[in-house]
Amino acid sequence: MNDHYYRPGNPPMSVISIDHLPTLLPREASEQFSGDLLPSLLEFPSRKASRVWVEAEDLFKKKLVDAGVEEGF
């Protein structure tokens, strides 16, 4: 366990994500999904200025607060 992420009094948090939805849909839906996602992925290197990544980070931080998790990690 990385002590950087663990604080006494807060249990460690694990996240498991299984993003298999596109594989359950027809090929066209998978192509549409990846086509819609690609522009956001290409903006990742400039994520500090990219609207989609700034909003995603803000939402992530809000959900941490809502879950009672300290933000300073």
Image: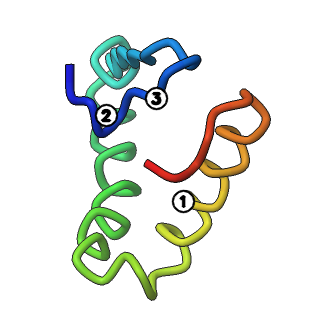
Front label number (1 vs 2):
1
Which quadrant holds residue 16? top left
Figure quadrant of the N terminus? top left
Q: Look at the numbered disc 3 and give the secondary structure of its residue.
A: loop
Quote the CA–CA distance across marks 3 and 1.
21 Å
Quote the CA–CA distance across marks 1 and 2.
25 Å
Mark 3 or mark 1, which has the lower sequence index?
3
Q: Is residue 33 left or right of residue 34?
A: right
Mark 1 or mark 2, which has the lower sequence index?
2
> Could you say where residue 19 lies in the image, as x and y percent from the top left?
35, 22
The residue at 33%/35% (across/down) is 28
The answer to whether mark 1 and mark 2 are in CB contact below 8 A is no
From the viewer's side, name the closer residue of 4 and 52: 4
Q: Which residue is label 3 attached to?
A: 7
> Could you say where residue 38 lies in the image, as x and y percent from the top left?
28, 61
Front label number (3 vs 1):
3
Q: Amino acid at mark 2?
A: Ser
Mark 2 or mark 3, which has the lower sequence index?
3
Which quadrant holds residue 55? bottom right
Q: Which residue is label 1 attached to?
A: 57
Q: Amino acid at mark 1?
A: Glu
> Could you say where residue 71 lies in the image, as x and y percent from the top left?
58, 49
The residue at 26%/28% (across/down) is 27
> Could you say where residue 51 lies in the image, as x and y percent from the top left?
55, 79
Q: Amino acid at mark 3?
A: Arg
The residue at 39%/15% (across/down) is 14
Q: Which residue is label 2 attached to?
A: 30
Quote the CA–CA distance across marks 2 and 3.
40 Å
Identify whether 63 is placed above or below 50.
Answer: above
